[in-house]
Image (spheres, rainbow, N blue to C red):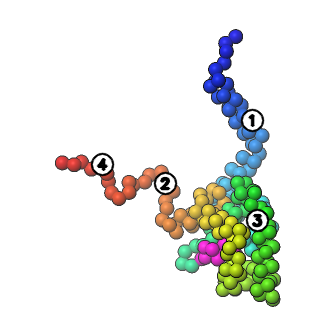
Amino acid sequence: MREQSRRSFLIASALGVSAGWVASNWPAIFEARVLAARAATGEPVELSFFSKEQAVEIDAVASQIIPTDETPGAHEARCVTFIDRALTTFLRENQPVYTEGLEKLGAKTKEMFPGAERFSALTPQQQVQVLTAMEHTRFFAEVRRDTIMGMFAPPSHGGNCDEAGWKLIGFEDTLKFNPPFGYYDARSD
C-alpha cells in the first residue's frame, strides 16, 4: 500500500469538504442565483428580513443619504432590497442593530414631531432633522454604509437597479479598460 503524501491528503480533504459544503448548501445557492437573476432584470424581489413597513422606513432613510435629484438616488437604485438581502446573508450579525435602530428611529420621530406616525411620513426637512439627531448612532452608520454599498454594488446583488450608481460615477461594467493617463507602449525613437 502506497503512503499518501501530506499534500495529496490536504487536497483530497479540501475537495471533500468543498463538495460537502456545496451539497449541503445547494438550495440556498440555487435560491441566491434565482434572486440575483430577478434583481438583475429590475423585477421586484420579495423581502427576506424587513416587513413592508420596515422597508418603507429604511428606504426613506436611504433616500436621505443618497437623495434623488437630477440623477437617481437610493430609492431608484433599490438600496433597500440590497440591505434586506445583506441582512439575511453576509451581514446577518447586524440584524439586531437594524431592529433596535428602527425602534429608536420611530421613538425619535415621535419625540421630535409628536403628531407624526412614522419617519417616512415626515417632510424631507423633518427627516433630515431626525437623522441629524441620530447621526452618531451605530444604526445610522450601518444604514449609511449599507446604502452606499447597495448603490454601487453589482445589480445582481439586489441594489444598483438599472446600474443607477454606476451611471452616476461613469463606471462601465466591461472587462476592457483603457490604460490610465495615456498609452504607455509608445515607441521611443
Mark seen at residue 185: 4
Dot 4 amino acid type: Asp
Location of residue 76 (image quadrant)? bottom right
Query: Does residue 47 sit above or below 185 in this rendering?
Result: below
Dot 2 amino acid type: Thr
Looking at marks 2 and 3 on the same chain, the residue that comes earlier in the sequence is marked by 3
Q: CB of mark 3 within 8 Å of CB of mark 4?
A: no
Number of the front mark, 3 or 1: 3
Q: How would you rate the neighbour count of disc 4 (Cα within 10 Å): few for under 14, some for 14-19, many for 20 or more?
A: few
Residue sitting at x 80%, y 83% = 110
Dot 3 amino acid type: Val
Number of the front mark, 2 or 4: 4
What is the residue that sits farthest to the front in this orientation? 136
The Cα atoms of the two marked residues, 2 and 3, are separated by: 36 Å
Q: How would you rate the neighbour count of disc 1 (Cα within 10 Å): few for under 14, some for 14-19, many for 20 or more?
A: few
Quadrant in which the N terminus appears: top right
The Cα atoms of the two marked residues, 3 and 4, are separated by: 52 Å
Q: How would you rate the neighbour count of disc 2 (Cα within 10 Å): few for under 14, some for 14-19, many for 20 or more?
A: few
> Which residue is more in the foreground, 135 or 19?
135
